[in-house]
Image: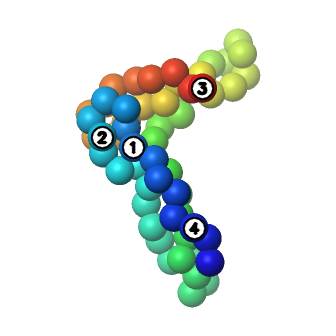
Amino acid sequence: MEERLIEHCPHCGADLIIEYQEKNEVRYGSLKIGIYDRELDMVTHFQCPFCKKIWERK
């Protein structure tokens, strides 16, 4: 069984981890939205789905 990750929005403090079941196993995923830069070909920022604020990927 996977250990539940801890991930919060740095602006509003909302819990960004979602728990779901797949094939009778508990799985965890992230709700944060990745903002992709085509020139760099990578995700450079994340956005909170609750408060819509953006922060840099570290």
- Report if the CB atoms under discs 1 and 4 are less than 8 Å apart: no
State the separation of the CA atoms marked 2 and 1.
Answer: 5 Å
Q: Which of 4 and 18 is in front in this view?
A: 4
State the separation of the CA atoms marked 1 and 3.
Answer: 14 Å
Count of marks placed on residues: 4
Quarter that holds the C terminus: top right
- Report if the CB atoms under discs 2 and 1 are less than 8 Å apart: yes
Amino acid type of the residue tagged 1 in the rendering: His
Q: What element carries label 1?
A: loop
Q: How crowded is mark 3: few (under 14 residues within 10 Å), some or many (20 or more)?
A: few
Circle 1 residue: 8
Q: In this view, does 9 lie to the left or right of 28?
A: left
Q: Which of 12 and 37 is in front in this view?
A: 12
Q: Which mark is residue 58?
A: 3
Circle 2 residue: 13
Identify the mark nearer the N-term, 2 or 3: 2
Q: Is residue 24 left or right of residue 41?
A: left
Quarter location, residue 39:
top right
Quarter location, residue 49:
top left
Identify the mark nearer the N-term, 1 or 4: 4
Amino acid type of the residue tagged 3 in the rendering: Lys
